[in-house]
Image (spheres, rainbow, N blue to C red):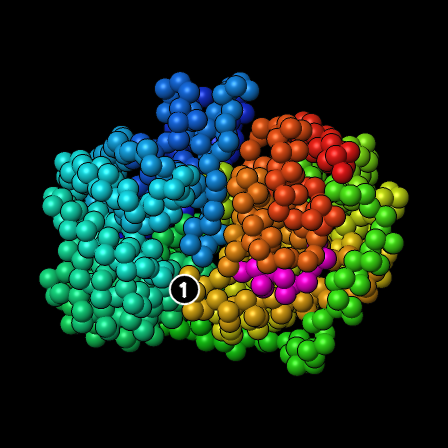
Amino acid sequence: MAIIHNLGFPRIGGRRELKFALEKYWNGEANAEELVQAAQARFDDNLSRQANLDLQPVGDFSLYDHVLDHIIMFGNTPSRCKAGDDELHQYFRLARGRAPHDDVEQQVAAGEMTKWFDTNYHYIVPEFTCETSFTLNDKALIKQIHRARSQGFDAKPVVIGPLTYLSLGKAKDNVAPLALLEKLLPAYLQLLRNISRCGVEWVQIDEPALVTDLSSEWQQAYHVAYQALSQSPVKLLLTTYFGPLENNLKLATQLPVDGLHIDAVRARHEVETVAKELAPHKVLSLGVIDGRNIWKSDLSATLDWLEPVARNRGNALWIAPSCSLLHVPVDLNSESRMDPEIKSWLAFATQKLNEVELLGIALNKGREAVANQLAENREALLRRRISPRVHNETVRQAVAAIKPEDLTRHSPFSVRNQTHKTHLDLPLYPTTTIGSFPQTSQIRNLRRERNAGTLSVEHYNTAIKAIIAECIKEQEQLGLDVLVHGEAERNDMVEYFGEQLEGFVFTQFGWVQSYGSRCVKPPVIYGDVRRPHPMTVAWAKYAQSCTAKPLKGMLTGPVTILNWSFVRDDQPRWQTCQQIGLAIRDEVLDLEKAGISMIQIDEAALREGLPLRKSGWQTYLNWAVDAFRLSANAVKDATQIHTHMCYSEFNDIIESIARLDADVISIETSRSDMALLDAFNHFDYPNQIGPGVYDIHSPNTPSTESMVYLLKQAAGKLPAQNLWVNPDCGLKTRRWDEVKPALENMVQAAKVLRQQV
Ligand code: GLN
Ligand code: ZN
């Protein structure tokens, strides 16, 4: 009998219930007990949606972030967060720099955040020093296990494995994270013992680091770690996902564990080898349903290759989604407004579990038992393949007509830079922002009313214009040098464009957690992409008419639109990216024509698309950079192209960053103390750069001194005439009363630096 299970479920809730509960708690509108109750309701709902599985994941649920949960569970909390002994307060201090009701003295630097493998989920980075020790504090997990078991579920706790945990962290001194393994293992062993005492049989121990390039030292450490953990009384399902094991395949199959899960979507070609290498008494768990996209799986095709594997494996075969379903929305059934044809091609988390279930029945009872469902599935896939809505001849022709010179600016940066100096008249250390200003409840209400039809488009536009005018006035009063319109009309930097481009469909409730309470609603790219009309020009033109200062037009770049969307799986990603590049190029040219002299094309997610293995990087970077160049480089010399990237490490991609040839790049740096600038320094990066000096992810107000300090650091690494002054990222998640003093201090910091030259 094949066993069916799941690796993890989205925790934010189909209606983002957890997000709202968290925000109420942070704002002081709800107490800790109310927050816990709301979280338990989510937890219970998640379990009930997984009731048909043989095993339910537990411990995948988290109030804010599962890596943060592990930091707390292993007593790895940085001492700066420890004031008082309220654990929830410590938790949120590390997450966001402050707990509710913290006074200024208790506020701290929040933990650094970075992307979870190649996803758009961000986790809090564990911090390690030579002094780091670990003490087990597993109350929260044990409570979840009891809660699930008391409801009759066969709980399978999910724990990040010790080596992936260490590899996710960052050394704050010269400690080598691997050197901490010896100290960490006893805590893991104790944890597994405690779990076993709850009556649990299986633990899912996640080691996705096994699909990345590992040095022999790290590979060796896996042997050490799992030898030690094999003494635990529970059975371990070593779980890998997001890619093939490649040169770690032998290692993964040989470790002394009771089962191995592999991503049988991205590593389909390894299934037979893994099945052969893995001892027959061990469980082989195959992630056969794609946990990274929203397309229906081809169930019959899956069964074609899965059935022989199942026959060979007998009882020891488990099936599941390829990875945790954290990266897809909760339930397609909530989409009442979606075009039914497109909807019939899709599956969200709940539907994906349904697919797993159907495959399980087909394997255990034969395909006849689910013949109707399989036929329906085949039918839906066929209709998608032949749908005329997917293919657009105009787009195909435009792509075929792209010439290499379309990707290159007329003059090199040195020439453009001179032109900008005469045309733009900016001071040294020009100040600007990344684009968005606070999305107030007034703005959200306007949008809601417009969408509900209770507010006419005309009234909506008038109201948004008033907000833009107000936002411009505020920026002028703050004394910023380059203004933005504030993005009030945008719900989300990708969805806004997706809604206006052909080939995209958007959801009502397709939320996916990005970090903590922040969610995104990725559009679905189902067909050829075309821009039927200008998307931002009217707003930018209006904003520019409100001010004599230069205004940056604001666009999202093709790579980011691609990486933050659910992308069609019937053509290579680069082709879809190129189509988007052409659409943005049209928009850039229309903005230029409308008199906008600076255009920012955000590529916040460029790095996110990097394959997990270095061997795939160059291919990706080549086409990604080309798509950006296609979108940006048709403009005249006098137009200044900006780009923005968040959460990026630049060392290993600096050549590609330079090849973008943006006149100005703004990046996130404040939490990393400007260390990210070293890459630009070593490369002698010639173009201009705005290192973020204000951490917008924390509600704390940065002082002028802290920003002067950061700017001085930056000026030590890069020529002052190349530097801009800006926050780390957009301000949409902040409140005006947070933004104003922060920007005031920022403008002041730029003045201090100008005086010192
Ligand atoms: N222009 C966008 C904003 O300010 C950029 C956001 C981002 O980089 N994530 O909101
Ligand atoms: Zn950003």
Kindly identify the amino acid type of the residue bearing the numbered disc 1: Arg
Q: Is residue 338 above or below residue 66?
A: below
Residue positioned 49% across, 33% down in the render: 110
Query: Which of the 4 quarters of the picture holds residue 526?
Result: bottom right
Q: Residues within 10 Å of mark 1 (few under 14, many from 20)?
A: some
For label 1, the SS is loop
Task: Please say whether residue 507 is visible from this viewpoint.
Answer: no
Q: Nearer the viewer, residue 8 or 128?
A: 128
How many labels were placed on the picture? 1
Give the residue pinned by disc 1: 613
Q: Most prominent secondary structure in the magenta stretch? A: helix
Q: Quadrant of the C terminus?
A: top right
Q: Name the spot of residue 680 as percent of width and height, x first.
A: 60, 54
- Magenta residues? 653-664
Task: Please say whether residue 225 is visible from this viewpoint.
Answer: yes
Query: Which of the 4 quarters of the picture holds residue 356?
Result: bottom left
Q: Nearer the viewer, residue 344 or 567?
A: 567
Q: Name the spot of residue 394 as percent of width and height, x first.
A: 69, 77
Q: Nearer the viewer, residue 19 or 665?
A: 665
Residue positioned 42% across, 20% down in the render: 83
